[in-house]
Image: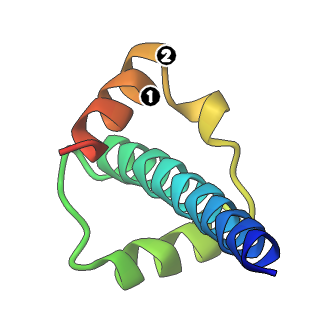
Amino acid sequence: MTDDLELLRQQKYSADLERYEAQLLETAALLKLFREKHDGQQPASIEALRLWARTTIGDTIDPYAVLTRSEIAQLWEDAEY
């Protein structure tokens, strides 16, 4: 019984981690596109960034098409701290 509960906890943790990683990549890609479009300016908030993205880009974005390998590696390195 405890093994089943532990397995369920691990599965939930894994799913949560995957969602976090996807959101982190998407946010980094949107920030990069926003900065390129607005001469390096920062958005007022994450909500403003997401609104800009929905009205400008649409609902989906492929972060791997926007970010370079080195940017992704730096993102993971920064996220560890």
Q: Secondary structure at mark 1?
A: helix
Question: Which picture quadrant has residue 5?
Answer: bottom right
Q: Which residue is depicted at the point 34% across and 36% down?
A: 75
Q: Nearer the viewer, residue 8 or 33?
A: 8
The CA span between labels 2 and 1 is: 5 Å
Q: Quadrant of the N terminus?
A: bottom right
User: Is residue 74 visible in this depiction of the protein?
Assistant: yes
Q: Is residue 59 visible?
A: no
Mark 2, residue position = 69
**Quick check: marks 2 and 1 in contact, CB under 8 Å?**
yes
Q: Quadrant of the rendered structure where residue 44 is?
A: bottom left
Q: Position of residue 26 (x, y in %)?
A: 54, 54
Q: Residue, x 46% and y 55% (percent of image)?
A: 24
Q: Amino acid at mark 2?
A: Arg
| Residue 76 coordinates in the image, percent (x, y) | 37, 35
Left or right: residue 45 versus residue 37 is left
- Is disc 2 placed on a helix, strand or loop? helix
Q: Position of residue 2 (x, y in %)?
A: 72, 78
